[in-house]
Amino acid sequence: LGFYLSGNPLYEHGETLARLGAATTADIREGLVDGAVTLGGIVTRLRRTKIKSGANTGKMMARFVIEDLHGALPAALFAEAMQRCGGALEDGAVVLLKGTLRGRESETELSVDDVTLLADAARQLVWSIELRLPSGLGTREVLRLRDALVENAGELPVTLTIEIPGFDVRIAAPERFRVRLAPNLAGILETILGPGSIVEHFGPVN
């Protein structure tokens, strides 16, 4: 119907899209960007079709509409790009697109070169993780925290912030407790430490 009963899913991703340098459909409409563009949004009206003529006969392509908080834009993923990254395309997926703006029948269309799930793109921005430990954290919770970090070993440095009335104490965790941003890690850590206990620190966009 063109509206969301529980709010547009993109509201929570605004800061991430800004860090990734994403344009908006409003920028495109107003002529503020031209040619190559990065655009974030939700995939809708996805249609996959088989190419019937030309050098790519028999291969698959896709057409869809990318929607953000400002509007919508037709997009196309042709054969070569479809083979590389078409697997990330699903109706309702929140994605980051890179491509080129082209005129098509008096309207603008995005010819897509790359599709990345926004969650995957966001993970590339995080340079370190801060875990806020409440005062009085029990031995059982500390051991669960240690196990969670070891089971999700990676390259991201971890800082432990211990909350003491009046001030905080920050401790750099040993290298063996560096982590990777596994999809379920935040949920596991918040179960142990409580809601709002994880702070992601971002680096610059390449």
Image: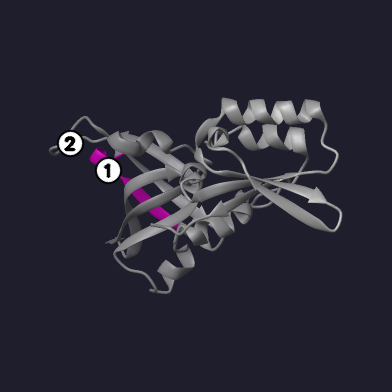
Residue 60: % across, % down = 28, 33
Residue 73: % across, % down = 43, 57
Query: Residue 78's mark?
Result: 1
**Residue 2 visible in this rendered orientation of the protein:** no
Instruction: Say which residue label 2 marks.
Output: 56
Residue 59: % across, % down = 23, 32
* Residue at the image position 65 percent from the left and 38 percent from the top: 186
Q: Is residue 11 above or below residue 146?
A: below
Which residue in the rendered view is the most extreme toward the left?
A: 55
Q: Using the image as rendered, state which of residue 147 and residue 42 is in the foreground.
A: 147
The range drawn in magenta is 73-81
Query: Residue 86's mark?
Result: none
Whole-Å distance between the Cαs marked 2 and 1?
A: 9 Å
Q: Is residue 140 left or right of residue 173?
A: right
Q: Is residue 138 magenta?
A: no
Q: Mark 1 and mark 2 in contact (Cβ < 8 Å)?
A: yes
* Residue at the image position 49 percent from the left and 56 percent from the top: 203
**Residue 166 visible in this rendered orientation of the protein:** yes
Q: Is residue 66 left or right of residue 169?
A: left
Which kind of residue does numbered mark 2 sit on?
Asn
Q: SS at mark 1? A: loop
